[in-house]
Image (tube, helix red, strand yellow):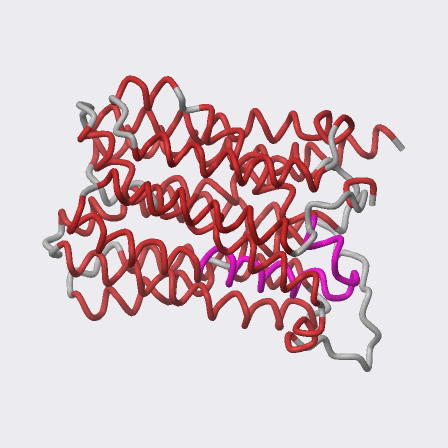
Amino acid sequence: MKDSFVRTTARLSVLYFFIYCPLGALCPLISQYLSFIGFSGTQVGIITSLGTATAFFAGIFWGDVYSNAKQKRVILAGMCLAAAILALAGSGIKGFLLYTLVYCCMYFFQSPLHGLCDSLVLGKEGSFPVIRAFGAVGYAVCVFITGRLCDANGLQMLFYVYAAAFIVAMGLLFREEEPEITVKKEEKIRISALLQQKEFIRLTISAFFVMGTSVAHNTYFGFLFRDGGGDVSGIGLAFMLMCGSEAVFMVLIPGMTKKFPAEKLILFAMILSACRFGFYAAGPTSSMLLATFFLQGIANGILLVELIKYVNFLVEPKYSSAAIAVFYAVASNLSVIVCNFIGGIILDAAGARMVYAFYSLYNVAAAILYIAFGLHKDKKYQKK
């Protein structure tokens, strides 16, 4: 049994490495690529915002499709292939309207993949924190490799790395066995049923005020780093350290949950995230930002693993995939839209430091709601 657990963990860790590699290729460099081909800052903002907006609706759509599909791994593999093809198609487009359309279509297939893969993995034996940690490793490694390739061969290389990683992930998905079917043949899972899950709704609302900042932070950190005296190369190093540290703390989570209730760890991570952004709002130097890279690892390492496990605990197994997809759509994608939009307004009006002051208060709201809803009470979900 133990050998099977280790083999499953190792196999799924490889899958997660490649599933998250495309994000490492795309997210840090897409704005630079769009600027390089002649798009204005406003156009770059429109494209990326519409991509995130597409992700919100895509999560709900694919959550419904995946929940009711018999061949779930085929659905995931097909989404990988579609995202890869659209990325390659987009690399040859220079017109704003056509590129925006292709980019949004790519996001439609890409964005729900990671949440649905979480559902797939949680239905199998294996250590989810360790498996998810390899996703963070894949992201960090791909940031570094793609940056080097783009420096040597041009920014369009990011699309080739993105597509290649998804093709490998597609092949790995076909090797997986289908998860155990928990839905009766005549039964159809409906997203609307989740509205009756009060604890799930409360957790989603609480997470809305913390997950969006962890992603939107990637957009504005460069401005803060430059204000602190750093340069462009230092920004890349900071992202590699911060993302890499997430993997370290994800691996440590199984040991941490043996000593502390997982619900309390989530609350701690929310408070730490608020303190971290409050520290950023004080205007630290670039050296101090680099020195405190591990704060992201602790906060995000806990939140990205334990929030998903909490969602999986709160709903019936047959609703797991739909709940996780909706959770990502609302608590992450919709929150990112809000954080990026308000953050952009604050950046123009008051600078990067005030953006992080807003993010800190946003996270404080998450912690307050989490406590007010009673979600911090020990429910032993880590033992499920």
x and y percent of residue 303 in the render? 57, 41
User: Taking the image as drawn, is residue 367 in sight?
Assistant: yes
Please state if 311 lies on the left or on the right of 59 as rendered.
Answer: right
Residue 181 position (above or below residue 383): below
Give the residue at x 26% y 66%: 100
Residue 224 position (above or below residue 105): above
Give the residue at x 52% y 45%: 19
Give the residue at x 77% y 65%: 318
User: Taking the image as drawn, is residue 120 in sight?
Assistant: no
Please state if 212 lies on the left or on the right of 175 as rendered.
Answer: left
For this orientation, the residue located farthest to the bottom is 186
Does the magenta segment cover residue 330?
yes
Count of numbered marks = 0
Please state if 182 lies on the left or on the right of 273 as rendered.
Answer: right
Please state if 339 lies on the left or on the right of 44 as rendered.
Answer: right
- Please tell me which residue lies in front, 282 or 291: 282
- Please tell me which residue lies in front, 331 or 236: 331
Q: Which residues are magenta?
A: 310-333
Residue 69 position (above or below residue 124): below
- Please tell me which residue lies in front, 355 or 298: 355
Dominant SS of magenta comes to helix
x and y percent of residue 266 in the render? 62, 40
x and y percent of residue 240 in the render? 38, 27
x and y percent of residue 169 in the render? 54, 46
Does the magenta segment cover residue 108?
no
Q: State the quadrant of the N terminus.
A: top right
- Please tell me which residue lies in front, 356 or 172: 356
Q: State the quadrant of the C terminus.
A: top right
